[in-house]
Image: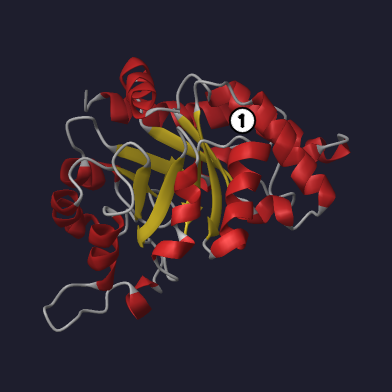
Amino acid sequence: MKKHELCSNINTKKSFLCIGLDTDLTKIPQHLLKADDPVFEFNKAVIDATSDLCVSYKPNLAFYECLGPKGWQSLEKTMGYIPKNIFTIADAKRGDIGNTGKMYAKTFFEYFDFDAVTVAPYMGKDSVMPFFDFTDKWVILLGLTSNKGNEDFQQIKDTNGNSLYKQVISKAQDWGNPENLMFVVGATHPELFSEIRQLASDYFFLVPGVGEQGGDLDSVVQNGKNEEIGLLINSSRDIIYAGSGKDFQVDIRSKALQMQQKMSLYF
C-alpha cells in the first residue's frame, strides 16, 4: 500500500486506529472453541465488527506460530478476509542478515502479502535492507518501545547525550524514507513524543501501549501527530477482549467506536 492510500483511508474514516489481532485461545469467547478454526472465527468476528472503524490490523505472529501448522493456516485465512484497503502489519519483529533476511521478507510480503512488517534493527543496516526490496511494502523499525525493558538499551546515552533510540531513528532515515519506513514509538513515553517527532517529522509512528499498558491517547496525539496525522495507534486486548459472551461483537464494536470517535476530534 502506498502512503497516499493509507492517508486517504485515515481521512475518510477519521480514524488512525490499528487493531492488534493477538488471538489467544484461552481468552476468546468459549463457544468459539467448538469451531473447526476458532482463531479464524474469532478474527473474522473482530474484522466484521470493526473494519469500518480502523485503518489497520496487526496480527502478532507469536499467537499463530505457537499453534504450528494450524496457526499459520488461521493467519493465511485471516489475511484473505481483511479488506484490501486496510493496512496490514505482520508484528514479527524479525531482523537478520543475508539470505535469512530475504526469506523473512518473502514470507510476509510475498506469501502472506502483508503491507508491513516490524523489524528489529539491533544487527544494523544489513539486517534491515532486505525488507526494502519490495515495492509498496513497509518496514516498521523498533525505535522506542513501550515495555519497561526499553531502559536497558534503548535509552542508554552516548558521550554527546544522545539516546540509542534517537541514533537508530536518525540512522534509519538513510536507509528508507517516509514512503516505506515507519517507527515503533511506545505510548508510555508521551513526554518524548515532541522530540521524536522533530527527529522524524514526515514519518508514520506505530504506537503501542495505549490502554492496558497505561498510554494516553490524547497525550500521544497532541505531542506526536504531524500534518498527515502520522500515527497508527494500536489497541489489542482492550478491543478484541472487550466481550466474552455470545454477543461479544457488540462489545468489541463499542470499544473500537469509542476510540474512533476520540480520534475523529483531531481532524
Q: Position of residue 247 (x, y in %)?
A: 67, 26
Residue at the (72%, 36%) spot, across then down: 76
Colour setting: secondary structure
Q: Residue at x 65, y 56 (%)?
A: 62
Identity of the residue drawn at 26% across and 61% down? 171
Residue 6 in sight in this render? yes
Specify the amino acid type for callout 1.
Answer: Val
Q: Position of residue 200 (x, y in %)?
A: 20, 49
Q: Nearer the viewer, residue 237 or 228?
A: 228
Count the labels in the image: 1
Q: What residue occupies the far top of the structure in this picture?
A: 12
Residue at screen point 81% across, 54% down:
68
Q: Quadrant of the C terminus?
A: top left
Is 129 in front, or is 172?
Answer: 129
173 horizontally vs 129: left or right: left
Up the image or down, 92 lies above or below 21; here it is below
Q: Position of residue 207 (x, y in %)?
A: 36, 48
Q: Is residue 258 left or right of residue 133?
A: left
Report whether 247 appears left or right of 199: right
Q: Is residue 242 visible?
A: no
Q: Which residue is disc 1 drawn over? A: 46
Q: What element does badge 1 sit on?
A: helix
Residue 230 spot, x, y in % from top left: 27, 37
103 lies left or right of 217: right
In the picture shown, does residue 173 fall above or below 247? below
Vertical comparison of 157 with 128: above or below: below
Q: Quadrant of residue 159 in the image?
A: bottom left
Q: Residues within 10 Å of mark 1 (few under 14, many from 20)?
A: many
Q: Quadrant of the N terminus?
A: top left
